[in-house]
Image (cartoon, rainbow, N blue to C red):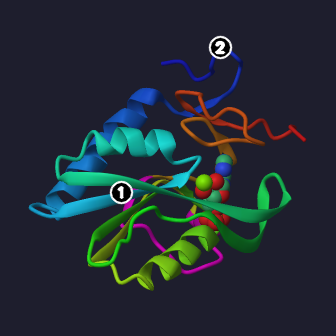
Amino acid sequence: MATKTAQGLEILLTRDQIAERVCQMGEQITADLAGEKLVMVGVLKGAAPFLSDLARSITVDATFDFVAVKSYAKGSRTSSGAVKLIKDLDEPIEGKNVLIVEDILDTGLTLTYLRKIFLQHHPKSLRIAALLDKPSRRVEQIEADYVGFSIPNLFVIGYGMDYSERYRNLPDICLMPPDTP
Ligand code: IMP
Ligand code: MG
């Protein structure tokens, strides 16, 4: 198994490992929501590849919606704590089963903010699926209902995740070289 990409980036999770785990998550979500309808809400832009794969491994009747948030960055790798909604839901979620689909749960600020505003709309249920979890970075007390992989405090790129908007299209999840400015 290759540990580096053609560009020389170190691979943390291969496309095969991701595919296998996303399938398992989909099966779990399908079992938990048996007979129910689901609204999958992707957090743009990073969650797009994960939502796309996860949705195809879920067999319950599902629709998609998307939100976008901005967290005020001090540096490219850290956020200041302020989160703002820059694209709201297209459809009301009142009375619906909602699954927030996020690429990575880091400090927890983004998902704490989204959970709070979604709950104000009184969904029937609200769950969170995060492909990656960095529990050591948590600032807000929040856990996802479904986690793909728990990882140490490393900055990752690929499979939707970016560094200054680049690398989202890498098929594997790679480590950002630490010497990058
Ligand atoms: P939180 O609000 O700190 O939990 O941040 C979540 C968001 O920060 C994620 O949706 C990502 O957009 C971004 N993020 C956190 N860690 C990483 C990383 O290692 N690589 C790329 N983006 C990250
Ligand atoms: Mg994100």
Locate residue 102, reporting x and y percent.
50, 56
**Magenta span has 15?**
no
Mark 2: few, some, or many residues within 10 Å (few <14, many ≥20)? few
| Residue 154 visible in this rendered orientation of the protein | no
Query: Which callout, 2 or 1, points to the residue nearer the camera?
Result: 1
Q: Quadrant of residue 134?
A: bottom right
Looking at the rendered structure, the number of numbered marks drawn on it comes to: 2
Return the residue nearer the eye: 37 or 162.
Answer: 37
Residue 179 to residue 131: above or below: above
Locate residue 148, reporting x and y percent.
41, 51
Return the residue nearer the eye: 3 or 27.
Answer: 27
Q: Is residue 16 left or right of residue 142?
A: left
Instruction: List the single residue furthest toward the right.
Output: 181
Instruction: List the single residue furthest toward the left.
Output: 35
Q: CA distance from mark 2 to mark 1?
A: 34 Å
Q: Which mark is residue 30?
A: none
Q: Which residues are magenta?
A: 135-148
Q: Which residue is at 72% across, 34% downward? A: 166
Q: Secondary structure at mark 1?
A: strand
Residue 156 to residue 101: above or below: above
Q: Mark 1 — residue?
A: 40
